[in-house]
Image (tube, rainbow, N blue to C red):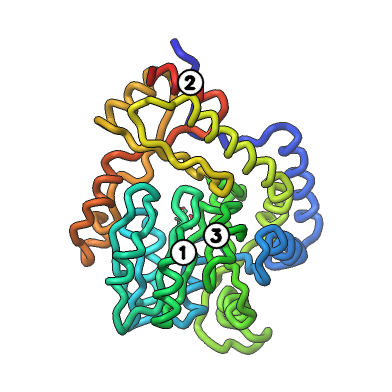
Amino acid sequence: MAERIPFLDLRPDAALARELEEAAARVIASGRYVLGAEVEAFEHEIARFLGVAHAVGVSSGTDALIVSLMALGIGAGDEVIVPAFGFVATPEAVVRVGATPVFVDIEPTSFHLDPARAATAIGPRTRAIVAVHLFGRCVELGPIEAMAAARGVAIVEDAAQAIGARSGGRHAGGLGRIAAFSFFPTKTLGALGDGGLVTTNDASLAARARSLRVHGATSRDDFAEIGGNFRLDELQAALLRVKLRRLPAVLEARRAIARAYAEALAGAPLELPRLSADDTYNPYVVRAAGDRDALRDRLAGAGVETAVYYARSLTEQPALAAWRAPMPEADRAARSVVALPVRAEAIEAVARAMG
Ligand SMILES: Cc1ncc(COP(=O)(O)O)c(C=O)c1O
């Protein structure tokens, strides 16, 4: 019986566990549990890492998207262009602020929104394009940037899967007008619960995001607009500060695993993600040349647990049925993608199963 290799194992090693416990103990003893010194320090540290002017800690990646759209003043009557393949939170945030998602099909090698299709989707009501840096790779913004600028359309980055990813020497989170990150535990920088971040280089957008996360407050007693409770708590911020210090090593390890997979799987009937020191492989997604379920069964037989991101294109989701439309590339991706464990011990087992 082959050794079982789980898709993910989020348990910290002993050294990390000790540091996390120390950070948690510090917060417990402080008596301050929401939006305090830990959140402030984390915001400064992560802004420095990302090379952005402003970072605003929030309650989740989904809330980071909602806050980003609200900070841009997007709401009823507005349209926001989103890719047809990805996680439901992206169009969900658009609908939650009262705007209308306009889905465009994807470019098949990157799985990202196709810039040519996005260009034709821009209309008089378009206020933003959400560039989802899916699978830890930055969207090629060049072609989108030019047309968005020409039409006064904001680029919002959904960087939930892309902490540490770069494009043209800049980090995800500093490529558009405003960006949303997730610290869901499975992310490359994962909290021990929920958390998120809004980043921007625009001081007025940052100030509005800061206000929106506490019910639109401008002071203790004044509420300028309807916001929400989108706060990041001190415990998660303290734990994230510990994990942020290890992030460069974690990113390097992920890239090394991608290089090893590329070598071990050369010639296998799979389309592998591109090899780039800019990408972070969160998750590491291959495309099966033949039957996806047969491939997953074969890997499971070799003890390798896999996952599927995502089994349906977004317009096929019942919650988004109002926007159902043919999206051939998104549908093809949904039928053929398989995520492999980003774990050194999986590489040989996968290569053997494919050999
Ligand atoms: C692309 C994308 N957008 C948004 C989100 C939402 O983040 P969260 O789960 O922190 O709300 C996620 C994560 O699950 C995601 O992968």
Task: Label 1, secondary structure: give it.
Answer: loop
Q: Which mark is first along the chain, 1 or 3?
A: 1
Amino acid residing under circle 2: Arg
* Among numbered discs 2 and 3, the one appearing first in the sequence: 2
Depth check: give the residue in front, 113 or 312.
Answer: 113
Image position of 228 with respect to 31: above or below:
below
Question: Horizontally, is 228 left or right of 221 in the view?
Answer: left
In the image, 18 versus 152, the foreground residue is 152
* Quarter occupied by residue 270: top left
In the image, 238: left or right of 287? right
Judge left or right: residue 233 versus residue 172.
Answer: right
Query: What's the residue at 34%, 46% (across, down)?
Result: 310
**Separation of marks 2 and 1 at Cα, in angstroms:** 40 Å
- For disc 3, the marked residue is 181
Numbered disc 3: secondary structure: strand
Q: Amino acid at mark 3?
A: Phe
At 36% from the left and 59% from the top, the residue drawn is: 113
Local packing at callout 3 (Cα closer than 10 Å; few below 14, some 14-19, many 20+) is many
Name the residue beneath numbered marker 2.
Answer: 4
Q: Position of residue 199 (x, y in %)?
A: 60, 68
Query: Disc number at residue 141?
Result: 1
Secondary structure found at label 2: loop
Question: Whole-percent x and y of residue 180?
Answer: 53, 64
